[in-house]
Image (tube, rainbow, N blue to C red):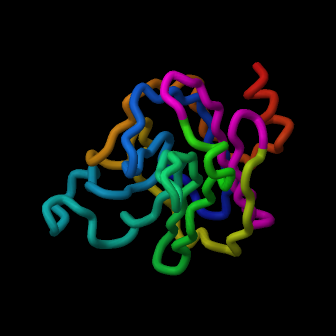
Amino acid sequence: GTLPTATSFTLETWVNFRTINAGQYIGIVTKGREGRNFDGDPDAGGGFCTAAPCGDWVGLYKLQDGGSNQVLSFEWAYGSVCKAAGLQDPRGLAANLSTGTWYHVAASFDFATSTRRLYVNGAQVATDTLGACLEAAIPHYTRLGTDSNLDFLDGQLDEVRVSFAARPAAWITAGYNN
């Protein structure tokens, strides 16, 4: 389904990594399109989308921070104006992910305040304010364990939830504790 403009939302899931490949940009729960285009049209460039709205996307990702730590991040790109930096877990080595461990991760966006929040294991670890960045609805697919056909999650997801509401911290913490 479409992620409409002027909408608050929350992405939430449990994730367990079987392997963690350094440097890979792994989509955990993503909305929109990054990388290969799966909508069936013959885009130029060997299947890579080259025209709007295919560049619009949001999602929860595993990526490498500025050092060697593998961390969780709320990534964001809407249209030609808003290419926001990822909202990464800033805790450095303390945020470094391990294999065989279940992590509860959630990302929320409050449209009324333009605020993004990233939660790991029930605790808010990062927040920022974007400004009005929703230029267009995102009609593309919701993906689990990837954002393209280039890198895939080697692990498990459980209790995946996409809500059209910016869930409050108490809701996220309850999801972690239950």
Quadrant of residue 35 within the rendered picture: bottom left
Answer with left or right where residue 101 lies relative to residue 175.
left
Q: Where is residue 112 in the image (x, y as percent from the top left)?
A: 79, 64
Residue 1 visible somewhere in the drawing: no
Residue at the spot x=50%, y=66% of the render? 77
Residue 99 part of the magenta-drawn span: yes
Chain part drawn in magenta: 98-123
The relative height of residue 47 versus residue 96 in the rendered view (above or below) is: below
Residue at the spot x=63%, y=51% of the render? 92
Magenta stretch: helix, strand or loop mostly: strand
Residue at the spot x=62%, y=59% of the render? 87
Q: Where is residue 110 in the image (x, y as percent from the top left)?
A: 75, 57
Q: Position of residue 42 (x, y in %)?
A: 16, 60
Quadrant of residue 135 within the rendered picture: bottom right
The relative height of residue 74 versus residue 121 in the rendered view (above or below) is: below
Q: Position of residue 43 (x, y in %)?
A: 19, 64
Residue 51 part of the magenta-drawn span: no
Residue at the spot x=74%, y=49% of the render? 125
Q: Which of 163 and 83 is in front in this view?
A: 83
Q: Nearer the viewer, residue 44 or 152?
A: 152
Q: Which of 46 and 39 is in front in this view?
A: 46
In what quadrant of the picture does the C terminus appear?
top right
The relative height of residue 178 versus residue 34 in the rendered view (above or below) is: above
